[in-house]
Image (cartoon, helix red, strand yellow):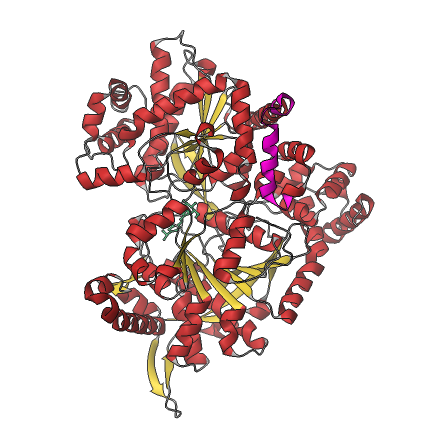
Amino acid sequence: MLTTTKFKEEFEKIIEGLYASNLEDTSSIQQYTALGNFIKSYSSDNWNKTNQLYLEEQVKQVYYFSMEFLPGRMLKSNLLNLGILTTVREGIAEMGLDFEAIVKSEVDPALGNGGLGRLASCFMDSIASLGIPGNGTGIRYRYGLFQQKFVDGYQVELPENWLRNGNVWEVRKENKAVMVRYGGEVYLKEDGENKLRPIYSNTQNILAVPYDTGMVGYENNVVNNLRLWSAEIPPEEEIRYKTIAEREVVNQITEVLYPDDSNYEGQLLRLRQEYFFTSAGIQSIVRFFKKQGQPWSDFPNKIAIHVNDTHPALCVPELMRILLDEEGHSWENAWDITKKSISYTNHTIMQEAMEKWPVDMVRELLPRIYQIIEAINQRHLDRKISLYGEELTYRTTIISEGYVKMAHLAIIGSHSVNGVAQLHTDILKEETLHDFYKMYPSKFNNKTNGITQRRWLHLANEKLTQLIDDKIDQEWKVNPAELRQFKAYSKDSETLNQLSDIKLENKKRFAVYVKEKYGIEIDPTALFDVQIKRLHAYKRQLLNALHILDRYLKIKEDSTLELQPRVFIFGAKAAPSYIYAKQIIKFINALAHLVNNDPDIGNKMKVVFVENYGVSLAELIIPAADISEQISLAGKEASGTSNMKLMLNGALTMATLDGANIEIKDLVGEDNIFLFGLTNDEVNQINREGNYSSIAVMEANPRLKRVLNCLINGTIPGIEEEGRVIYDSLTLFNDEYYVLQDFASFVAAQERADTLYQNKLAWNQKALINIASSGPFSADFTIMRYADEIWNVKGKAEKHAS
Ligand code: 26Y
C-alpha cells in the first residue's frame, strides 16, 4: 500500500536525482516528469510480470495494428488505474505543489486524426482492464496531428512537436529492432530442395526501433504494451548515406502523421509508413512466436492480428512473405495460418476514404509484396469464378484498373470483417461490400464501438462519478451495465438537483476557459449546445450553422422575443487540403464574430469555436454539454463515439438516425432523444428517384431562403468568397448531403429542445436516463465481444458480466 508519506519521500528523491535541486526550484514540467518516472517505476514490476506471465503461460495474444492512437494525457489515467490517484494527489498538495498544473504540463499526444485513433486508445484501456493479453502496434510519429490556430477566422496549421520535452512513458528497446526492406529487385530461385526462394538485391534497409509504453489496467495489476515503431538508418549502413537529403528520406518515414481522415491521397510516403509498421510488427510477432517453440499450426491459436481499417492491411502479404520465404511454408499452409490469424474492422463507407494504391507504386516500393498480392488475387479469382461466376468475382478482385484495393485485400486475407455500428454493418453487407457478403456471409459481423468510462466519466467528470457512487455504490466501475441502477433516481428531486448542480459546475469550468482563452463571456445557465468532431461536409456542421443564423435573424427581427439562451460550441479540425471544410470554418468563425459582438443579441446567443480540438479539450467540453449534436446525413457516419461520451455525461442527443445514434435511441427511448431528418431508407429512395432539388426546397421555405441569402448578401462580414462557395454548393450543386432537406425538421427539433429546457425537472430527468442507459456503450463490453467472437482470447478474470 502506498501512503502519502512514502510517496512524498520517493517523489523528493526522484526530483533530486533528476534535477539536483530542491522542490521549490523545479518547474511544473519537471514535477510532471518526476511524477511520470515515479509512476513508471511503481508499475514496472507489474509490466514485467505481465510480460513474463504471457510468455510462460503461452496464452493467446492480440496484436491491434493501428496507424493511429490518441491516448490523451496519461498521468491521471495511470494513477486512476493503479488505484493511487487520491494518495498521490494528497501527497502533491501536502508538498505545496499544484496538482492540476502538473497534470496540464503533459502534452496530449495527437498521434491520430479522430474517431478511429481514439477508438484504438479506448480499446487499449479496456483490453488491459479486462486482463486480456493484448498489444498495440503503431507508428511513433515525430510530429502529431497539426496544431490548429485561427487567424482572422481561418484555420492555420502549425507543427505539433509533442516530443519537445521528451516522453516519460516510453521505453526505447533498441535490442528489439528489426529491419524493414524496400525497393530493389527480387526474383525467385530454386533452392536445391525444389522450392522457390526469393533473392533480393539493391534493397533499401531501414531499421525499425520500437518504443514501448505500458498500458495500465484498472486495478488489476495488468500492464500491457503499446509498441510504436520509429525509422532509423541502420548503424552498419550509415556509410551508404552520403547526403543530408538521403538521410532525410529515412527520417521522413515516421516524421509526421497524415492529417487526412476521409480523403484518400495516394502518396508514396504513406505507403512506406504502412509497410514500415506492419512489417516491423509482424516480424516482431513471428520472432516472439518462434521463441516459444510451438508448432506453426498453433500460430492462429496463439496470435490474433487485428487490422484497424485497411491502413495495416499489408499485414496479409507480409505474414505470407515471412511464412513462405523465411519459414519455408507451402502456399496452402501459409494462407491457412494468415487467414485464421487476421481480422479486419471497416470504419467507413465513404468512397473517397477507401485506400487503393497504384500498381506501379506498390510494385516498385515492395516488389516481393506485390508478387504475393498478385498470387493471392489469382488464387482468389481461380477459386471463386467457378462458384460465383465471372461478373461477381471480378468485382471482388484485389487488383483492377491499375490499382491495388486494400479493402479487398483485407477481406480476402482475413477471417472476420466487422462494421462499427449496426446500421453501418448492415450497409456494408447490403450495399458497399455486398459481393463479398455473398461470398463470405459468415465473415461479416457487427461490433458497435464503445468508450472507456474511466477516462470519459471517472476522470473527466469526478463530481458526477461521486454522485453515482453515492447513489448506487461502486460496482458499476467494473461492470458498467450496473449504471442502469441509477435510473431508480430519475424521479428523485434531490438527485436531479445534484445532477443539475454538477452540470452547472462543469459549465462554469468551461466558461472560465473560454473567458481566459478568447475573452468571450458565456453564461453558464444558458443551454450549451456542442458539436465536436472533425470537420467534414457529411457531418454537417453547416446544418448547425444555418440553425444558428436562423436564430440570429429571429432575434434581430424581434428583440423582445423570449428565446432560450444558448451557447453554441464547436470544435473541429479540417484536413489541410480540404478547402471546402476550411471555408466552413471561416464561415462559422465569421458568424461567431457577428453574433458575439452584436449588442442586440447579448446573452441570448453566443458562438464559441475552440481552437485545436483534441482529447484534452474533449475532457473539458463533454461534461459541460447539454445538447450533443450528432447530425450527419443518415448512412454516412459509421458509428460516432463522441455521441456516447456526451450521453454518458448527461447531454441529450440531437440526432439523425445514423451510426450508433440508432442504438442510443433504442437504449434511451424516443422520449429521451431529439430525432430529426431523413432516415437511411429515405436517403436511398431520394437517391434512386434522382429528383432532389435543393433549390425547390429553399424556394418552398422562406425562413431557409432568408438564412441562405445571408451567405451572399453581406450580412456576415468577411465571407464574400466563402459565403458564395457554400451557397453555390447548397443550391447550384444541389446540396450533396441534403442539408436543406433536413433544415426544417432540424429547426423544429431544436425548438422542442428549447421548450424542454425551460422545464428543468423534465430535462434533468432525461439527462439522468441518458447517463443510466449508457453502460452498454462501455468499450469493455465491445472488447469482450471482440475477444469472444473474433479473437478467441480470454481475459484475466471474468468479473465483468454483461
Ligand atoms: C486512408 C486515410 C485517408 C484515412 C485515414 C484515417 C481514412 C480514414 C481515417 C479515419 C477514419 C475515422 O476516424 N473514422 C471514424 O471511425 C470512428 C471509429 O470507428 C467512427 O466512430 C466514425 O464514425 C468514423 O468516421
Most prominent secondary structure in the magenta stretch?
A: helix
Horizontal and vertical percent position of residue 345:
42, 55
Q: Residue at x 26, y 24 (%)?
A: 708
Q: Outermost residue, right direction?
A: 5
Image quadrant where residue 592 sits: top left
Q: Position of residue 234 (x, y in %)?
A: 50, 71
Q: Is residue 706 above or below residue 236?
A: above
| Total residue callouts | 0
Q: Nearer the viewer, residue 756 or 209?
A: 756
Residue 494 visible: yes
Residue 91 position, x and y percent, is 77, 41
Position of 307 with respect to 293 (left or right) is: left
Most distant residue in the bottom direction: 192
Q: Is residue 742 or residue 532 the one in the foreground?
A: 742
User: Which sits in the foreground, 528 or 250?
Assistant: 528
Which contiguous range is marked in magenta?
477-496
Please check the rendered image and state whether residue 479 is part of the magenta-colored stretch, yes or no.
yes
Answer with the quarter of the image where residue 687 lies. top left
Q: Quadrant of residue 8?
A: top right
Evaluate whether residue 249 shows in this view: no
> In the rendered structure, does residue 224 fall within the stretch colored magenta?
no
Q: Residue furthest top?
A: 560
**Residue 10, position as x, y percentages in the image:** 78, 50
Whether residue 759 sits left or right of residue 171 in the image: it is left
Q: Is residue 577 left or right of residue 59?
A: left
Give the vertical position of 615 relative to 199 (above or below).
above
